[in-house]
Amino acid sequence: MKAWNTKDILQVTRQFLESDEFGNKNNIDLLREVLNFHEWKYYVKNDPLIADAEYDRLFQLLKNIESAYPELIIPESPTQRVGNALRKDFPVVEHSLPMLSLDNSYNEADLYDWSKRVHALCQTDDVEYVVEPKLDGSSIALIYENDLFLRAATRGNGIQGEAISENARVIHSIPLKAGFSVSNISKVEIRGEIVIAKDTFKAFNHERMEQGLPIMANPRNAAAGALRMINPEDVARRGLTAIVYQLGMAIDKHGHSLLGSEILSHAQALQVLESAGFKTTFPELKVCNSINEVLHIIHEWDSKREHFPFETDGMVIKVNQFDQQKKCGKTAHHPRWAMAFKFKAKQATTRLIDVEYQVGRTGTINPVAKLEPVALAGVTISSVSLFNEDLIKEKKLMIGDMVLVERAGEVIPYIVKPVLETRTGLEKPIIFPTQCPSCGSVLFRSNGEAAWRCINATCPAQTIEKLKHFVSKNAMDIDGLGEKMIARLYHLNLLKQIPDIYTLDFDAISRLEGYGEKSAGKLKMAIEASKHQALYRLIFAMGIRFVGQQTAKTIAKSISNLKDLYKLTDEDLMQLNDVGHKVASSIVDFMATPSNQMLIETLESLGININSDSSLTITNLPLAGKTFLFTGSLQSLTRSKASEMLEQLGARVMNSVTNKLDYLIVGKSPGSKLAKAQAISSIKIMDEQEFLKFTKDL
């Protein structure tokens, strides 16, 4: 990464943004440098200097120049991250050096024994150790030559891996051009981990649940699966991050190794990688002079790992100096100079006592395991999703089994496996239903899908789920129509379909037990208020398959009226960000269905807003490019309302504290986010009253 002065880079950035004459083919190399710098600040340093919309304008400018002068396109250009071709296979390649596994232990005594062996092999008591988090992702090897990205490969069997270069190119924390030459390095192989941030993974799973898809079990599986996706554009949407942790090979232009000569230690090697433009484990790395210091660091991390943005399953301890690593040597399976200390897994065993089958709003039949309640990672678990029939068969689960349950961080718990050794012969097979548990219709399973579905459009369970989704907080946000109330009104024949919400008999509701005129009046006001919700909320509320909240926002910004979607084709929709072929086809099919068209017409006649306010662009809004985060409970408005208010002002609401956060809004009983934000001087912290005054004064 070129050493830019911040003032200079911003000045050049403004020239590209403000001067049409400056953005020409003569300055194309400078424009690429500017884009590379801002990508590094955003994806590696988590400290962006410009708004997303401004970056998009710079990127589009480069695309325009390269389109006009295709002879100027180079492989390391920021525009060349996503490959055009779909691969059907991943060729096997050989690693420059074997990617060995690490010896590991859960026992502190093993660390003392390992340290004694290290001292004996090095023939000295003067050994320096480094300790860093063990990232729970998918291993990768990267090769660069003359500063340019050459190849990426999976770990494979340690000797050979699959070449996944096209997929690696779309991961923005993997630079296409890295500054190795300043360290006299001509060719290098780097080891790292592909991970997904906890917040990104949580949002990803939430989106899958909204789309009626099974959630991913953990970030590691999601990352590993993404690396082998056929289409690089699908990989890009997964939100992967590459964090490098080892310099496996570094050769100068004469073919001489620099490890142990010019680069003397692991800590120094990570500094080289950091300065070359990579996201590394160096900020978390600690250098220790004894194994007691190492254990102190491990205990610290065990208590704070929940607050680390990525999943960790332990700590890695290495001999720091390369000459001592060489003395320690390696076995056929692992290096003797490194060891992994694994944290205790968040697992528990309990009994699977039954399986219930729930019907989702898209007709998906969702099996749910009912467990004997068990305490796990601070919560009591009694129900766990089994996702689909294939997973039940794959894990060979039976009713009555003792099962191993795992919960990592805030991820939904899942069953790892049955404990086969405890079976008594009294266990019963799990028989997946062939008929809908709600309406009795025969279930249907499409080719290529894991889910069984009820395709009866009048299925009571589906109807109730659709109503619940329509009124939910992220959709039309109708307070007073909770799950129990919807089910109650449905069974009383007061609410049978979505338009009925806007023609409810409030006199009848006021006479219900536990209700009254005041409660009925509040519900009426909430329903009336929902008629004026933003268009994206209505699009999301209609429950179009594969269309989550973010996609709904993207669609709403691209149209002036909901009926505009009648005219759009798959190809039109695929021009939008985050809309692929599957999502586009789903939207087109939904809009072409007569019953859905009738629903839209009916909602419009009832006074529901179907128009989009696209008169303001985000760059014109007062909080354009600013980021906010909430912690604690707000007293005068809900978080959903506060977030929507900020988005209407151009701001982006984040899920976690990072260096790119601008404002933290603190409500009642704030959580750990407050302490983390106080440690970052650039974050402005406001209480609720300050926040309300701040937004009012804009």
Image (cartoon, rainbow, N blue to C red):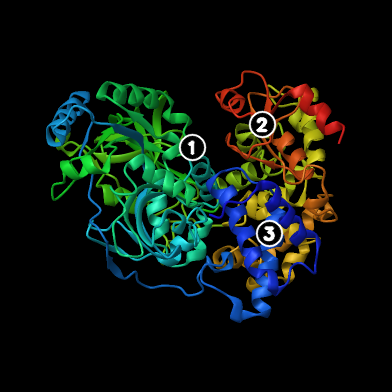
Q: Secondary structure at mark 3?
A: helix
* Crowding at mark 3 (Cα within 10 Å: few <14, some 14-19, many 20+): few
Q: Pick whichever, 46 or 11, lies toward us.
A: 11
Q: Secondary structure at mark 2?
A: loop
Q: Quadrant of the C terminus?
A: top right
Above or below for 13 versus 491: below
In this rendering, the label closer to the viewer, 1 or 2: 2
Above or below for 182 versus 327: below
State the CA–CA distance, disc 2 to disc 3. Answer: 25 Å
Task: Please name the residue shown 66% across and 42% down the image.
Answer: 474
Q: Earlier in the sequence, mark 1 or mark 2?
A: 1
Residue type, numbered disc 1: Pro
As drawn, the label of residue 56 is 3
Q: In screen coordinates, is 180 left or right of 498? A: left
Q: In screen coordinates, is 465 left or right of 330? A: right
As drawn, the label of residue 309 is 1
Provide residue 688's location: percent of width, then percent of height: 74, 24
Q: Pick whichever, 89 or 150, lies toward us.
A: 150
* Crowding at mark 2 (Cα within 10 Å: few <14, some 14-19, many 20+): many
Residue type, numbered disc 3: Asp
- Which quarter of the figure has residue 424? top left
Residue type, numbered disc 2: Ile
Task: Write down the residue under mark 2.
Answer: 683
State the CA–CA distance, disc 1 to disc 2. Answer: 18 Å
